[in-house]
Amino acid sequence: MSRAAPQPKENMGNPEPRIDGRLKVTGEARYPSDFAVANPAYAFLITSAISKGRIASIDLGDSIAVPGVLDIFTHETIGKLNEVPFAPGGGGSISSMQEMGPDIHFDGQIIGMVVADTYEAAREAAYRAKIAYTEGKPSGTFDAAGLTEEEPSKVEERAKKLPQAGGADAAIAAAPVSIDVRYGTPTHHHNPIELFTTTCVWRDGELTVYEPSQFVYGLKNTLAQKLGIDPEKVHVVSPFVGGAFGSKAQFSPRTGFVAAAARKLNRPVKLVVTRDQGFSVQTYRAETRHRIRIGAENDGKITGFSHEGWEITSRPDPYSVAGVEDSARLYSFGAVKTRVTLVHADRNTPGFMRSPPVVPYIYALESAMDELAVKLNMDPIELRRRNDGMVDATGKQWSSRSLMKCYDEAAKAFGWDKRNAQPGSMRDGEWLVGWGCASAVYPTHVGASSARVRLNANGHAHVQIAAHEIGVGINTIVAQVAAERLGIPVSAVTVETGDSSLPPSPVAGGSNQSASCCSVVVKACDAILDKLSHASGTTGSGDNSRAPDLSAAFERLHVGAIEEYAEFIPPGGKPDALAQLYKGRPTLGGGSHGEKLMYALGAEFVEVRVHARTREIRVARIVGAFAAGRILNPRTARSQYMGAMIWGISSALHEATEIDRRNARYTNDNIAEYLIPVNADIRDLDVIFVPEKDDFVNPVGVKGIGELGNVGTAAAVANAVYHATGVRVRDLPIRLEKLM
Ligand code: MOS
């Protein structure tokens, strides 16, 4: 694999190295729990050992006896904290289950917190707590008894908002070729390398919170609500986030407990949630089931498509990803019928996890497309080509669509024309070779944002924006865009992010960050250029010869620096979007919800090798070609795609949270037994950029890429495994026992 920076193609920026790369690799980058606070006390959580029931009694005698213990908080002593709304879109709580008890709703619920002079003392005291329960009989997974499906009226209500067009049932019944297949995906946990941490410091009634966050304004406002204080008294610090993937986008009840404890003890309190506790105190990707029916003409033209999904959620919260919104629009289906049903279980509430709607739903669709191609005896790329089009079944137009270009480029690089379609025909010694492909798709989101840019007479610029460096390179992208706009080198720009005292930007979710942040930074830069050009008598912004003689212009203006605060509301956005953002409520638009369908697209090709006797499965090669509008930085973009494709391989072959069916508890809550790929699992990996220009999506023409690359991978692997073995595995992950 080549390590040289990918050279920019048409409509791409420079492959600048990460401006914070050195800080990160030398350990200088400070993550929230790295901040030194004076005289900290350490917290350790006590979590429930049952999944359903009630705390009968708490005996803390042995815990309090541990030297160094300062206090132990339970539902009896934590005091009154306000209930804050469950808000799956960010800007609220991960769950409506926010109490320490006495009722137990899920495995690993926080039921107590020890605070001590040392971490070790807090941990020992927590382990010594004696909790007695009255235990109920929990139901945690699809095959458990006692689950509650939503009432049909709620399912109908949701279906009205999902894509429906024409008579799909009749079209499928009348079609000469049809399939009716079911798929399943397991629970996944994000497992970011950086654990879930919170440090709270009170001073004169004001609270500083050091916590990794994908939405500092959401955290600030929701925590203030929780504590019943003015949001201006809460300051969130989160300059670097060590991986998030959706798990750090919302308020989590732990933060309220730490803040309350620090207030009561009048001392800074620091909590680092352990790896295993992280499985239950945060969110996860919900387990899903799918039924897909497709009817087609003999030439492959699809006349009817039906996608039904079932998603596990907690008892109280209606968390849903409803990826039929995207699966039903990916091709020009003649007619579509969609439906999503929530299934309530004794579980913590699920939440965003990288590419939330599309990872499970497009896995199902793209597996079904392959099954249909087999049944039609047609090449799977050709099947997609016959159903490619600029209008979906509901009549919506795509803003731009380069899906078949992605297929063509990936197929060429992969050597697809040498494929023998017969399953099991491409044997290499003891290895069965299989080639498969699938589409990747992700909705293009953009949100209201604000930023402040200051340009000094010496040609240095400073950008302030409460964006979130979750590992994606946002600091670098923002610096590049500002530098390009102001006509100065990237090295002359510094960027400040990850702090709620900066101008707000949206939740770093839904791959909107580059589009939203860069749109507003460009606006602020243009305002500076306007002032400069007035001073120098040249015309305003909009051309490329912008860098006027800075020192002359500043001299004429009699100022030391020019600073501009800008606000950006995407076209069609609500006029109060910025006011809402300041209150911690993001409004992301895009995808299928605007005037046009706005999506980034891609095609992924995989070669698997399955050992003929042991059934060991290896991904020998993967090629992904992606089109996502303007690519601001091909180097950081390639890293996003590579990481995503590796994660896609992970969801295909490795990842699953195992749940004990008798007591609805997570059993592999560690990264030794929660399987993810290691270097030896990843062989040849190739990323192809397909140039695309789309001025409709947002002012910078960026579609967002963080969540595109892991969408098609699982289906491509499953399709390749079928091609190698003739065995169609319809539930993830594909492990060797399923091929026996
Ligand atoms: Mo991303 S899962 O939308 O934070």
Image (cartoon, grey):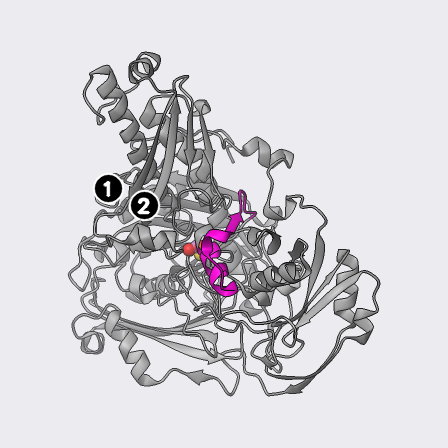
Residue 156 in percent (x, y) is at 28, 79
Q: Is mark 1 within 8 Å of ligand 1?
A: no
Residue 623 in percent (x, y) is at 43, 45
Q: Give the mark nearer the N terminus: 1 vs 2.
A: 1
Q: Residue at x 58, y 53 (%)?
A: 677
User: Disc 1 residue type?
Assistant: Asp
Number of numbered tags placed on the structure image: 2
Residue at the far front: name it: 204
- Decide: marks 1, 2 in contact (CB < 8 A)? yes
Placement of 720 over or under 505, stated as above or below: below
The residue that disc 2 covers is 703
Residue interval drawn in magenta: 218-242
Q: Nearer the viewer, residue 227 or 248?
A: 227
The residue that disc 1 covers is 694
Residue 38 in percent (x, y) is at 70, 46
Placement of 59 over or under 266, stated as above or below: below
